[in-house]
Amino acid sequence: MASGISGLSLYLPQYRVQLEDWSRWNDEPWNKIRAVVGRSFRMRGPQHSVYTLAANAVWRLIQDYDIDPAQVGFLALGTESSSDNSAGAVIIKGMINEALVAHGQSELARDCEVPEFKQACLGGVYGLKAALRFLATDGVGRQAIVVSADIAEYAIGSTGEPTQGAGAVAMLVNGDADLLEIDLAESGSDSQYRVADFRKPFARFRQPEREDGQLQDLPVFNGRYSTTCYIDATRHAVAAMLAKRPGQSIDYFTEVDSVFIHRPYHRMPATGWVMSYLFTLAADGPIGQAQLRGYCADAGLDAEPVLAELLADSPFEGQELGDGEGYPWSRKLRGHLLHSEVWDRIISTKLGLGAEEMKDLGNLYTAALPAWLAAGLVHAHHEGIELAGNQWLALGYGSGDAAEAIPMRVAVGWKQAAAKINFEAALRGPIDLTQEHYLALHEGRRSDLPPLTPHDEFVIDRVGIENGPDFYDLGIEYYRHVGGA
């Protein structure tokens, strides 16, 4: 068997915002929000941090898949929400070890590596690639855990406000993949620096202290420009992957069985995938370009500016700043294809597995892609869809920007491992927030929030306040495990 993913476990905080409620609070069209964004998102509570979210997902993974902690030689954290500039995954290891000891189990191995990966929403994918490289070299025979965890918060009134979320997904990675086999030699990469796409500079934290003591990690972003960056990066990563494959590149779009793309909101993956299809057609020579011209004719568009746009190496033409539409002609063509058989055959069919389930997760940043993989496997298992041997594509993206296109193959015995994925359990027991609760949570007013009932999970017990001279722990979080046998 090949190396890859053998287990997936999720953790979602209890606080939930129903987007239908949010639409009513803000006088926004619910039908549009539902079609473009989704149904709901989760928010972290006052006792949550990215480290507790991550540890809770890892704790569930260890229990769900009966992992021997002594065999774990690599524990990686992918996040863009870390609140400590020194430690990373070792914080998670500390929480897990305390829980393991309390349950009479051995600790995670002392020689376990504990890296943290950061590149916006791509950190978890980089962690996965690093884990596979570890297993192929000095970690042969060991196991790895990669956890993607994030807290996506946007300012009240911003265009990103309905695309919030919080949660974590932990992946068991080993040399005998039970779920998804991965050969990194077939993958494609892309990276290109964009100055003001989506950033989190420290200068944002120059604000009055909040009652709950939390840092509110609101990003600096430019909506349309960010969409253009997303399309540009995923396009080049796919092209790099396709260049390694034999045969005609355009054939891959019908040969691949399912596609999973980083999803900041429901509509974005379809945009990214259809654009990759159009780019590949344009690069396919006379045959592909003739097909494109036919699409343009059906849409009533002049094909020449569409082709020029798709054949250009970059949509920015040397300009790295701005918030304009990078692909205006292609956008018109996409609008036409949305109602054609091409959309059903290339887009809807390929992006269908688990897409409906993901509408209740919101934007999980690094955790969005592995969560969708989990949703797809659970969906197929529940519906009795046979996946063994299917070709999947995981297309990760991180603002700023970078992308990874990783082909995967569903393992022959995937069903047994898929049955252990706790997707439905992670969604249970939500606490729906009122508008007053939602605003209180955003403003850090802990006393105005509904109580949480943690069970078998890690929470922040307290935050250090000592600033010397004999002892220093200012700002350091102390954790405890609540409930559970």
Image: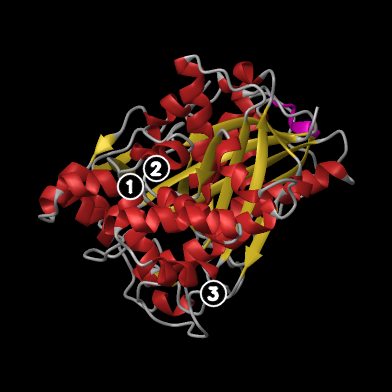
- Coloring applied to the structure: secondary structure
Q: Quadrant of residue 225?
A: bottom left
Q: Which residue is mark 2?
A: 343
Q: Amino acid at mark 2?
A: Trp
Q: Which residue is mark 3?
A: 314
At label 3, counting other C-alpha atoms closer than 10 Å, the crowd grade (few under 14, some 14-19, many 20 or more) is: some
Secondary structure found at label 2: helix
For the residues labelled 1 and 3, say whether their Cβ atoms are less than 8 Å apart.
no
Highlighted range, magenta? 67-71
Q: Amino acid at mark 1?
A: Leu
- The label nearer to you, 3 versus 2, is 2
At label 1, counting other C-alpha atoms closer than 10 Å, the crowd grade (few under 14, some 14-19, many 20 or more) is: some
At label 2, counting other C-alpha atoms closer than 10 Å, the crowd grade (few under 14, some 14-19, many 20 or more) is: some
What x and y, as percent, mark residue 292? 46, 56
260, above or below 189, in the image: above
What x and y, as percent, mark residue 273? 48, 50
For the residues labelled 1 and 2, say whether their Cβ atoms are less than 8 Å apart.
yes
Q: Residues under labels 1 and 3: Cα distance? A: 24 Å
